[in-house]
Image: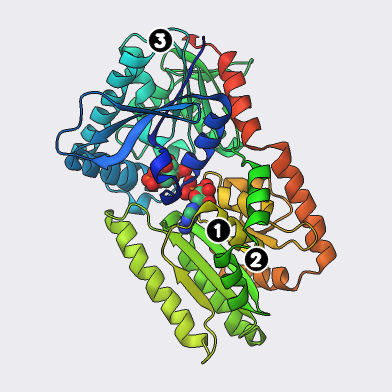
Amino acid sequence: MTRLIVVSNRVALPRDRSARAGGLAVGVLSALKRSGGIWFGWSGETSESPAPQPKVMKSGGITYATIDFTAEEFDAYYNGYCNSTLWPLLHYRLGLVEHSRQHQDAYMRINARFADHLAAMVRPGDVIWIHDYQLMMLPGELRLRGLRNRIGFFLHIPLPGPEIFCALPAHKQLMGSLAECDLVGFQTESDLRAFRDYAQYESGGSLRPDGAIEMFGRRLRAGAFPIGIDVEEMKSLAAEAEGDEEVRRLAHSISSRQLVIGVDRLDYSKGILNRIDAVGELLTTRPDYRNRITFVQIAAPSRIDVARYKKLRREIEGCAGRVNGKHAEIDWVPVRYLNRVFPRRQLAGFYRVARVGLVTPLRDGMNLVAKEYVAAQKPNDPGVLVLSRFAGAARELKGALIVNPFDQVEMAEALDQALRMPLTERQDRWRKLMGALQRNDLATWSDSFLDTLNTSERAAA
Ligand code: ADP
Ligand code: F6P
């Protein structure tokens, strides 16, 4: 029997599901719930002497196999290479990239360790689906261990063009490893184009007339598979949450004002500072909004040991404080900032109460929050999505108000337009957005990736 083995750094274990924010865990969990299979990855824990074998547990048709890292490995691999080197680079932030050989070596070692564990677990015929930038060396490491199984890799975050990607000293090793896959998937056509450009102009490879890519002596397929959400799940969560205590508290506290909401991991790619400033800009240029709107920014702590993330947290506190200091009144503050994780159902309820979903990343692979916000709306009185053109989701969500997050004035104008939008236009836009979500939901994403993987075969070029 063919088994699906999903591999990712982050695993949404049943015990800590509500405590982890992030699109990958949400997407992979829903996909695996449908098909069943094995989910292999990091336990989320560090220990002084990690067990030689993965910890295995079963729940709801999924087998979870996880390993620990030592604190030193976690620091060099996760805080270092993954989140101080690759993350900023792949989000087009060359100025934030830190690079050290020690971190790079740790990344290579952890990817090799993943391969050792997997090689002991995989049976012929199993299909292996590897996720995201933390594991770009894994396909190559698995081939080095003689595995001939079908291997697919999906990048959840953007891929910049070779002009940026090649700033990474190990760019050739990483791309050489991806070339060992049968199928490599991206969120958007523009990420796919960057991969093709690398193959053509950097690796000396070529694009074949049948769409296959030749690079580093291998022939493989690549495609854009934009990740979707479980629309029905989000719809019913939001409807059910309406009566919940926390959601009612929020609605009550907003009273007759209009709620604008932002929900993100606390990450500089999300554009939270620009967004708070845009709210300030709106209140400065259109003071009639004073005491008539409330902006709630929920930011889940993320990568808390990485210096740039610590700095961002302080910057957000400062920025929210400045806007509140300037505009607040004795009985009203414009910005409420909550630095915590909320259960999914509560988030769904919060989305539904909000007249505007303000989703304005500076760069984002997809951004599931944008899609969740739309799915959670009341059909007869939906809110408006204001969406950054630099989120992968902007390619599909044409019914949103699309903005440039670097342009504060444009964002303030879009906010104004959203807050004043008549019901019929809100309904028209929402129907269009829902159509897009339903045409490409989470099931379509995993089915189309896995169907393509099952019919792709790598070969020597
Ligand atoms: P990323 O993968 O970069 O974190 P996405 O927007 O694609 O960005 O996915 C984020 C996921 O994490 C969404 O499913 C969202 O609901 C969830 N999430 C974000 N912030 C929070 C939070 N404060 N509490 C709980 N879940 C959150
Ligand atoms: O979706 C992008 C992503 O980087 C995932 O790879 C990751 O699991 C998620 O965001 C959250 O980040 P982390 O796993 O570092 O908490």
Give the Cα distance between marks 1 and 2. Answer: 11 Å
Which residue lies at the image location 42% right of the left edge and 79% below the top edge?
Answer: 321
Point 57% across, 15% down: residue: 454
Q: Nearer the viewer, residue 63 or 290?
A: 63
The amino acid at mark 2 is Val
Residue type at mark 3 is: Arg
Which of labels 1 and 2 is toward the front?
Answer: 1
Circle nearer the N terminus (3, 2) = 3
Could you tell me residue 282's position as x and y percent?
60, 78
Instruction: Determine the residue located farthest toward the bottom in the rendered image.
Output: 330
* Mark with earlier residue (3, 1): 3
Label 2 CB sits under 8 Å from any ligand 1 atom? no
Which of marks 2 and 1 precedes in the sequence? 1
Mark 1, ligand 1, within 8 Å: the answer is: no
Q: Which residue is mark 1?
A: 346
In which quadrant of the rendered view does residue 64 lie?
Answer: top left
Question: Looking at the picture, how far across and down is residue 213, in whole percent?
Answer: 53, 19
Disc 2 is placed on an element classified as helix
Residue at the (65%, 82%) spot, across then down: 292
For the residue carrying disc 1, how many other residues have a C-alpha within 10 Å: few (<14), some (14-19), or many (20+)? some
Q: Which mark is residue 353?
A: 2
Q: CA distance from mark 3 to mark 1?
A: 41 Å
Query: At which x and y percent is residue 51?
Result: 20, 28
Front position in the image: 288 or 10: 10
Say which residue label 3 marks.
123
In terms of image quadrants, where is residue 239? bottom right
Q: Please state which of the two labelled residues, at mark 3 or mark 1, is closer to the viewer.
A: 1
Cα gap from disc 3 to disc 2, whole angstroms: 49 Å
Amino acid bearing label 1: Gln
